[in-house]
Image (spheres, rainbow, N blue to C red):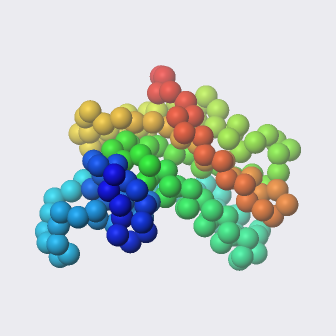
Amino acid sequence: MASCSVCGAENSEQARFCQTCGTSLGGMEPGQESRRTVTAVFVDIVGSTALAERLDTETTTRVLDTYFGRMKDIVARHGGALVFVEVKARQDRAFGDAAEAVGYAKRRRMVRLALDYVVEHGIVNCPCRFDVVSIQLESGRPVVEVFENAFDAVR
């Protein structure tokens, strides 16, 4: 096990970067050039503008901080996988849970988008999965649930 010099977390022997804070676990001097694979996450939180207009600044910040904290944890845990994430937020459960809004038609669109993305970018031999993030805003307290591998890429 390799220990991180910054946060003290224990990491697997294969880890090049701390799985908790992202600090390099050695092997390169600061400023030294290298080639490495990076993870880029593009997020469009549908309805976030309307949500921010309805909530006060502190609540909006708490909701987004909770969401980004959970997403950062997911990315840190799953190096090397391409993850397509649908984020849904609901004020109450009158029309069901936020995650229930990701129905068959939405799942099909996500699968088509993923297929287009991997073909367009020439991605091969990379595991993909589909997650759903549900944000419930009952009582002004955000409840964030992450459903990893929420569905399979069935056409």
Where is residue 133 drawn, in percent x and y? 61, 47
Q: Residue at x 46, y 43 (%)?
A: 84
Q: Residue at x 38, y 43 (%)?
A: 82
The residue nearer to you, when weighing 111 against 4, is 4
Q: Farthest residue in the top direction?
A: 155
Left or right: 155 as drawn, with respect to 47: left
Where is residue 114 drawn, in percent x and y? 41, 38
Relative to 36, say whether 93 is above or below: above
Relative to 7, say whether 130 is above or below: above
Where is residue 90 drawn, in percent x and y? 75, 52
Q: Residue at x 55, y 30 (%)?
A: 151
Circle count: 0
**Can residue 30 be spotted in the picture?**
yes
The residue nearer to you, when weighing 75 against 104, is 75
**Can residue 38 be spotted in the picture?**
no
Relative to 114, say whether 90 is above or below: below
The residue nearer to you, when weighing 150 against 19, is 19
Left or right: 78 as drawn, with respect to 126: right
Q: Residue at x 29, y 65 (%)?
A: 24
Where is residue 122 drawn, in percent x and y? 23, 39
Quadrant hosting residue 91? bottom right
